[in-house]
Amino acid sequence: MNWAALLDDLRAQRRAIGAFNAILIEHAEAVVAGAEHSGLPVVLQISQNAVRYHGSLAPFALACLRLAENATVPVLVHLDHIEDEELIREGLDLGITSVMFDAAALPYAENVARTKAVVERCHAAGCRVEAELGEIGGKDGAHAPGVRTDPGEAAEFVAATGVDSLAVAVGSSHAMADRSAVLDEELIAALAHSVPVPLVLHGSSGVPDEGLRGAVASGIVKVNIGTRLNQVLTEAVRSTLGTHTALTDPRRYLAPGRDAVRNEVSRLLTLLAK
Ligand code: G3H
Ligand code: ZN
């Protein structure tokens, strides 16, 4: 699959691809099943936080790569919000071909220098790199929301680093439990005009359907969604356990959670690809 060409086409057509974060194997299976159900390509993401939860990258990443290989639609396995460069090295060895290097919390000059070095190493290994400029709030609950990416600085950052896509701060915030974020569509349009690579929206769980459509129409090409999947999974599991209080076999309560995630992934992919 030529992912660069796919993302360029989406960018030209003002459509977007969904990128979903998986923590458990059930998430990953549901993301692939949802994409197959909608007949659309998808990005399956593993964050550094998910790697820390499991204790190491290889077991879960290899499972995701195998799921992607066996899927009937294109699935890109992507490492998300990676701050530890050693994890990128490990990912390249495992066959990962897309990473987000997150140095957004660093001062601009340091973000540029470290991102440029990661891009050189990744490109030499045939791996695409996404970076972030203008720290998107909410991650680990530690970052301030309300930050915005400047279009001029974004263009300069892309030229200086050689990144393949850029995560921008346009009004969303990570891990929002309600869908009340209001995006700055004028800023997205200005960024899409000045930045020559696909733009990525993070913290998209907090954005209502209408807002997601507006963001895509304004120039967002990749939409990252994590919290929303955890909400639907947990609601389904909670409801199943509430009804069947004697259940102990995890397959019996995780299967409805996995089905709920599959349905939401399929629905969102279709919304973004319209
Ligand atoms: O990188 C992952 C996304 O930005 C997910 O954010 O959990 O708020 O949807 P979210
Ligand atoms: Zn994110």
Image (spheres, rainbow, N blue to C red):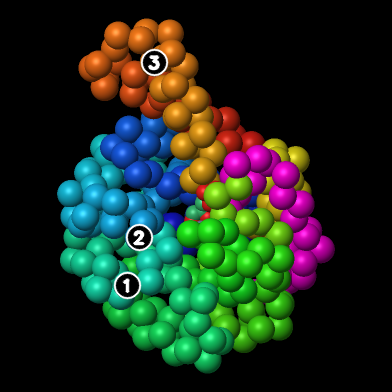
**Disc 2 and disc 1 in contact, CB within 8 angstroms:** yes
Residue type beneath disc 2: Gln
- Between the C-alphas of marks 2 and 1, the distance is 8 Å
Q: Is residue 123 magenta?
A: no
Relative placement, left or right, of 116 versus 63 is right
Q: Could you tell me which residue is drawn at 39 percent across and 26 percent down?
A: 258
Question: Mark 3 highlights which residue?
Answer: 241
Quadrant of the snapshot with the C terminus: top right
N-term mark: 1 or 3:
1
Rendered location of residue 178, percent (x, y) = 65, 40
Q: Which mark is residue 41?
A: none
Number of the front mark, 2 or 3: 3
- Report the span colored magenta: 177-206
Depicted 52 relative to depicted 35: above or below: below
Q: Could you tell me which residue is drawn at 35 percent across and 60 percent down?
A: 48
10 Å crowding of disc 1: few (<14), some (14-19), many (20+)? few
Residue 171 in which image quadrant: bottom right
- Can residue 218 be seen? no
- Can residue 104 be seen? yes
Question: Mark 1 highlights which residue?
Answer: 84
Question: Mark 2 highlights which residue?
Answer: 48
Residue type beneath disc 1: Asp
Q: For disc 1, does the CB lie below 8 Å from ligand 1?
A: no
Callout 1 secondary element: loop
